Image (cartoon, helix red, strand yellow):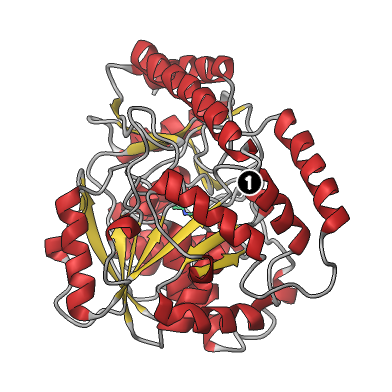
Amino acid sequence: MHLELDGKGALYEQLTRALKRGILGGHLGGGSKLPATRDLANDLGVSRNTVLTAYELLCTEQLAMARGGSGTYVAHNMGPRTSPSASHAVGPQSRYAARTRRLGPTMLARTQPPVRYDLHCGEPLLSPALASGWRNELGKAAMHTELRYTTLQGLAALRQAICDHIARRRGVLANPDDIVIVSGTQQALSLVARVLLDDNHRAVIEDPRYELAFQTLRAHGCRIVPVRTDEDGLVTNELPTTSVRLVYVTPSHQFPSGSTMSLPRRMELLAYASERRCWILEDDYDGEFRFDSKPIPALRSLDVRDRVIYVGSFSKIVFPALRLGYVVCPKALVDDLVAAKKLDDLGCPAIEQAAMAEFIKSGRLERHLRRGTAELRRRRNCLIDGIRSHAGKHIRLIDSRAGMHLIGWLPGFTYARFAKLIELGRQRGVGLHAIHHFYSVAPETPGLILGFAGLSPIQISNATKILGACIDEV
Ligand SMILES: Cc1ncc(COP(=O)(O)O)c(C=O)c1O
């Protein structure tokens, strides 16, 4: 088998990437057997352990499956998304395309067939009432919305409604002129990258990290500096002393570890940005869901020097298919951001914006959030109770009291045993997802990122029962 190692990082990482490219590109077909570890180690001149670790990582990512005794096989549903001849007939046509081709898949994008109980952290809290309510909002909005090209910065009514909402809920005082409506956090990240970063500028990103922020900045061509996080959020005294243009953070609820950035760290980060004249991108993706107290005000609420680009999204609090979010933009950047938005899409869809403006103004978003928080609390309690009863001896839960997922560490588990657990869970209908993919170096102890928003309490109970049984078996 021809595998090209890219020379970056540890050998097992290089090999995992090369195999992944082979699987996702369709060169290693679904169901086919991977070479025996000894043979591949000999072919490549690496140790057998390197190959074993790479295979284990592929199994953890569910790209491959170990069949006890008979070897490791490419997962059945794997294959090229398009025919290899169509997508890779030519080399990348730009540096951007070359960089995006090198990015791996993201954990947030589903590569597996659905399972009965998927504890995926990207699953939103949905309800039939929400869908029919939103249909009504859209119907009403369509009747009175101007159908010509819309304002680039976003409808004034929505920008005003967002200002009221974030003042009440996030402690952020903004003027409608500071707001730019975007199609979700993802567009905000792309626009900010274009406006702030040239090739080789440095951007700090939290470790562990939100993959799409990492990939967006990487594809853009900047140099990424991972900075560790702990229970108080970003470890600010490890911020680089070299020049940095942007620091990306999730202070309300670090993604994925769940910590909340402490006040001293917030102040240190703001001081760092102000001294070095760099920018902070605050991704406040689910900061409105807290279960112990009122939501903690956003970092932007402390930002007297106007260095924080605050990004809010309706993906978690309403639903992700909306593709609607907003940036509270430092004054110095508004025009550049709007110019980039113009070249991207000439503004977000007006009817959806008008519907959202009314949804907020009428108090229906507030009601939806109150009900949503109560429902999420029920689901979260159910997950905590279920894990304690069925897997309490093995899983150490980190309860961040916020958001839509918890972290469960499995001390005493090796990664090989952990991969077996994930595979067995899938066979029994429970989707389990590893946290180590989000780290620049896998932590010693394997851990699960346990999303609870997308399953009912009963489903969560069933899932934890199965999880407990799987742990006992592996
Ligand atoms: C850290 C983080 N940021 C942002 C988002 C939302 O992104 P978007 O607004 O593009 O849907 C998510 C969703 O899962 C997330 O996990």
| Outermost residue to the right | 143
Q: Position of residue 450 (x, y in %)?
A: 44, 33
Which one is in front, 98 or 338?
338
Q: Going 21% across and 74% down the picture, which residue do you hit?
A: 274
Nearest the viewer among 248 and 103 is 248
Q: In the rendered image of this protein, does residue 257 appear above or below residue 217?
A: above
Going by the image, does 80 lie left or right of 462? right
Residue type beneath disc 1: Lys
Provide residue 106's location: percent of width, then percent of height. Answer: 51, 56
Which of 328 and 431 lies nearest the eye of the viewer? 328
Lateral position of residue 367 relative to residue 17, left or right: right
Q: Residue furthest left?
A: 237
> What residue did someone put label 1 on?
361
**Is label 1's Cβ within 8 Å of ligand 1?**
no
Q: Quadrant of the C terminus?
A: top left
Horizontal and vertical percent position of residue 130 = 70, 34
Left or right of 113? Residue 74 is left
Residue nearest the observer in this picture, 257 or 322: 322
Q: Residues within 10 Å of mark 1 (few under 14, many from 20)?
A: some
Residue 56 in sight here: yes
Please determine whether, in this image, residue 93 is positioned above or below residue 40: below
Kindly identify the residue that appears in the image at 49 percent across and 34 percent down.
423
Q: Quadrant location of residue 168?
A: top left
- Residue 220 shows in this picture: no
Q: Position of residue 364 (x, y in %)?
A: 64, 37
- Tell how many labels: 1
